[in-house]
Structures are given as structure tokens and as C-alpha cells.
Amino acid sequence: MNVSDWFIRRPVATSLLMIAIALFGVLAYRTLPVSNLPNIDFPTITVNASLPGGDPGTMSSAIASPLERQFTTISGIDSMTSSSSTGSTAITLQFDLDRDIDGAAVDLQAAIAEVAPLLPPGMLAPPGFKKVNPADEPFLHLALTSRTMPISALDDYAETLVAPRISMVPGVAQVQVNGQQKYAVRVQVDPRKLRAQQIGLSDIDSALQNWNVNVPTGQLFGAEVTYNIQASGQLMDAAAFRGLTVSYRNGAPVHLGQVANVIDSVEDNKTASWLYTKDGSQRAIILDVSRQPGTNTIEITDAIRGLFPAFAAELPPSVHLMVRGDHSLNIRKSFSDIQVTMAVTLVLVVGVIFLFLGNISATVIPALALPVSILGTFAVMSMLGYNLDNLSMMALILSVGFVVDDAIVMLENIVRHLEEGETPLAAAFNGSKQIGFTIVSMTLSLAAVFIPILFMRGILGRLFREFAVTITTAILISGLVSVTLTPMLCSRFLRVIRPEEAGGLSRWLERQFQRSRRAYGVTLGWSLRHRPVMLAMFVAVLASTAQMFRVIPKGFVPDSDDDEIRMTIRAAQGTSYGEMVGLARQVSDILEKNQYIDRFAPTVGGVSAMNTARFSIQLKPRAERPLSAAQIIRQIRPQLVRLPGF
């Protein structure tokens, strides 16, 4: 049975089949998302609970411990960590990769309802939870700054103009605002004045609720016209609140400004973010943009940057929107490097084929297996929802050398029949019949090498599954091309060059090949005559391999340098916000002096505990600094440990 017989007899159908594969591959390539690593969804749920005024010890014993004991009854939990601070507790549950996140959420909701009677009655709301994916790190960091505008007004622009518009960009999952400073009026009551006026805090609270209202006033119906009555009772600034009547004493009203210091402030004055650049430091509102899984990072970044002219037209001249960090730059560079590497690989493979065959037609035929196999792989990747990332592109680069092997084997056997005097059509029939089963077995055996990777479990299995499927697909498609397109092209276009027809380059290459073969024969003969020496060399190499495997450093994945460092500093429990700001400034002074740091943004307070500060550090491009990110970390760490307060 000849697998290639049908395809050799129907060149038009074979050509259309290969064109269809290539066309689908081209269309799929244009739709494939681009990212740095494959999408890995970690089933993770975070539980948050709050108790106003609760100290960390109380939060841990009264809230975190009962929840943790109840959560242990949920199946599929891989790890559980909790963090308690003043007034809040956060518990992170990470489930097995095979656990359905929706089913885990239902079990978690039932567990929270069951443990609710054991929690303190002072909680304003029951514990809440949300599904998160730790792999969805922000890919774009923006900063909104102004040296003249109040930080509360700057926050208003960030949350009402910039963040909502960016959230509307297709592919954007979330825009997180750090350093939020929403406007609020702060009432600082003076206890001595309250006592002198015999007014309690409840009177202040009632007055604020009763006077600061915003409800519909009503309508006035006339004989011919109906009028809407507009009388807003909403107080908008501190000046309006100062005249608010709290109570009456001795027939005279007591205004809020007489017993309290009323100031224009923000809702949470225990959180702040700064932006440090080469031009100095200033308060900033930081926006972190996350993308949806399976979307193209580069396209989303370009779409967001395309909004900058519109933002510049709508924002006041004193407000500046800038990019603090952009992960797509490294993805672009990495993707460009991979494309160049693949192009060079293609040229080298085709060049080697030509050097050994010395025939242009014999070189073009197996070389056509390369684009068809790779484009067909793109189509399969699109159907499976894969990305163009470092691992999938590495698989394609490695497959370049594999996909031409089968085509070369088929070609050489057909050439042998041509040299024996057969016509191209007869040589294609006879050569493909002899070698067809061999090519099928070669393809399947080579693809079987990567099958165990498909059954790897855990994070590594999820990470390298895309690599294994991509390279296996390329190998299988190359086998299909070798038994279909290659023999068909050989039957129509292959021409063997006689020795007397060979050019000077072909004759020179043939002489070099014969010289190399004679040299190999000499070395092979010497090896067979000195078998004990070769056996000793084999044992030495084997022992050296075992020793090198033992001493070579091992890790989870190779270290990468994406020009960014994220750092968290933690002070003693109970450290005040003001003290933490001072510690953050000391750390910032150290970072400012580092010549390899381009800019950074520290954030104190916010979603983290009061005694922590987070630093997002943007390094200079890797080509402009001699030290890697890991080396810079080792350079900074000794300077930080000497600071007091940590």
C-alpha cells in the first residue's frame, strides 16, 4: 500500500490542500494573542473580613482562626495563607489546578455561612470573597501627576475620566487605582468645647446626617404649568459644613465650626503614592492595568496609548499622564528576537540542504515543508486558544530542524530511483512506496518523545503543555506534508543533475563532502582499533555528566529580567502611618542613588497593612545596564538591612 499514491495522481487537489493549510495558518497567525508566557489559570479565592477597631491579635484569633478551621473541610485546597492587620483579615485559598473554581466558590460560600455564628457580632458585614488569578499581573502602569492641583482633584480625574475610559478598551480586565485620595470633609471635634457646650458626639452625628441630605424636593402644580422645585441640601465643602447648626444652647444656635475643626481633606488620609523620576519626586495617582486571559498584550497597549491624545485634550494643562512601566516593551523585543531567530534558522536549514544536495529543485521541494508545517501549526494553536509566547515560539524554532527530516528522507529515496534511470513519475511512485511507512513511523516516534510532557501535572505541566502540543503538531503536519506534497512535487519538478552538468560550486562541495567522509572513516577505524580507550572515554563522559548534573544550580524556571523589581518593606507591628512614610522616604533615598533605576513608585497604606510599603521599581533597559535585576537586588539589599525600624 502506498500512502502517497492518491496525492501523486492528483496534483491539483494536493496543491489546494496545502494552500488551504497555509491560508488558515496565515489567518490564525493574525489572530493569535502575544504574551510572554502561556496563560495559566490558578484556582485562587481571597476572603476578606473586617472588624472596625480590631487589633491584629483579635482579628487573627476571633476571625481568621474560625474561618481557617472551617475552610479545611473544603476539598482540593492546595495552600491557605492568612494575614491580619488592624481592622481587617485576608485569607488566600489556592486550590489544585484540576479543581473547578466555580465549584470551589460554592463550597466556600457554604463554609462562610456555617461559621458565621462563631464570628464577632461587631462585624459590619459578613466575610466576602472573590475569585482571583495570581498570574494576571498588571501589564501597564500609568501615573497621573500635578504639581499645582490638589491630590483629591487629581484622584477625581483618575477615577472618573482615565480609569473608566481605559476599562472600555477591548481586552482590559481591570484598572486598579493606587494611592486613592477621594475628596471628603473631615470634622475634628474638640472634646473640651463639646463639654463646655454640653453637646455629645451623638448630637454631632445626628446633625451631620440631618443637614447633609440630597433628596427630591418635589413639584409645584399650577393651573397651566408644573414646576420642579430644586433645593439641594447637599453640603459640598468644609466652609458649608462650618455653619451647620448642631444644637441650641440658651436660645442661640451652636454651629459645627464652634466645636470642631472642619477642613477639606480626603476619605483615607492614611494612604499615599509617589512617583520618583530623574526630575524629582511628587505625589501621584498610580493606575495598574490588567488584561483579560487570551488577549494580545501588544494590541491592548497600543489601543491604550492611542487614548493619550484624547486624555491630553480633556485634562488640565497642569495634569500629566505618563507611563510608569510597560511590560509590552519586553514582549515586543522578545517576540522580535524570536522572529529573527526563526528567520535565521530557516535560512540555515535551507542552506545546509543546498550544500549537501547541490540542486536548487531538490532544495526547494523539502524547504516547502517548512512554511506549510509552521503555518498549519498556527492554525491548530488558534483552535486550542494558545498564545504566541516564548515557549510556543521556542517549540516552533526547535521544530524547524525536525520538519524537514521526513521530507529529505523522501526526497533522497526518490532521487536514488531517478539516478537509476526511472522517470520522475515512476521514481515518485516507487520511492514513496518504499519509504512511506518508514516516514510515518519516524514521525510518530519523534512525536511520542513529547507525549509525556502532556501528562505532567501541576504548574510545570500547565506551563509546558503548550510547548509540547505545539512541537508535536508541527512534527505531525511535517509528516503529512512529506507523504503528500513532497512526492507530488518530486514527480513534477525534480531533476537530477548529472556529474558532467554540475557547476563549479557543486563539484567543490562534492569534493569537500568526500574529504569529510574519508576523515570520518579514518577516525572510525582508529576508534574500533582502540576500544578500551573509547570505553574509558565513555565512562569518563558519563561520570562527568552525573557530576555536572549534581553541581549545576536548579530552579523552578529560568531567571528572567523584565526591567522591573517589586519590593515590599515591612516595619514592626503597630508602626504608625507617619513613621511608615518616613521609612519609605529613607528607602527612596537609597533607590534614587542607584544608577540603574530609571523611576519607581512607592505606596504606603491602602490595601496593605499600615506597617508595610510597596515599591514598583522600573529599571533602565537591559541593554543600558551591565547588571541584571537579580544582581541589582543583591546590591540594594545590604543597604536596606542597615536602616533602623525594620
Image: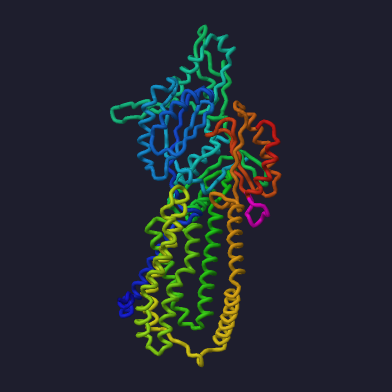
Q: Residue 80 at what x, y percent from top left?
A: 47, 35
Magenta residue check for 459: no
Question: Is residue 399 positioned above or below 134 on the image?
Answer: below
Q: Nearer the viewer, residue 158 or 14?
A: 14
Q: Which quadrant of the rendered structure holds the C terminus?
A: top right
Q: In the rendered view, how is the structure colored?
A: rainbow
Residue at the (61%, 55%) spot, across then down: 547
Q: Residue 541 at what x, y percent from top left?
A: 60, 62
Quadrant housing residue 144:
top right
Q: Residue 572 at what x, y percent from top left?
A: 62, 29
Residue at the (39%, 26%) spot, across then down: 115
Q: Nearer the viewer, residue 644 or 453?
A: 453
Q: Residue furthest top?
A: 250
Q: Residue furthest left?
A: 223
Magenta residue check for 627: yes
Q: Is residue 144 visible?
A: yes
Q: Nearer the viewer, residue 371 or 228?
A: 371
Question: Is residue 522 positioned above or below 630 on the image?
Answer: below
Q: Which quadrant of the rendered structure holds the N terminus?
A: bottom left
Q: Residue 432 at what x, y percent from top left?
A: 37, 78
Quadrant housing residue 545:
bottom right
Count numbered badges in the picture. Answer: 0
Q: Is residue 446 left or right of residue 529?
A: left
Q: Which residues are magenta?
A: 619-628
Q: Nearer the viewer, residue 266 or 543?
A: 543
Residue at the (60%, 79%) spot, across then down: 522
Question: Is residue 451 positioned above or below 486 on the image?
Answer: above
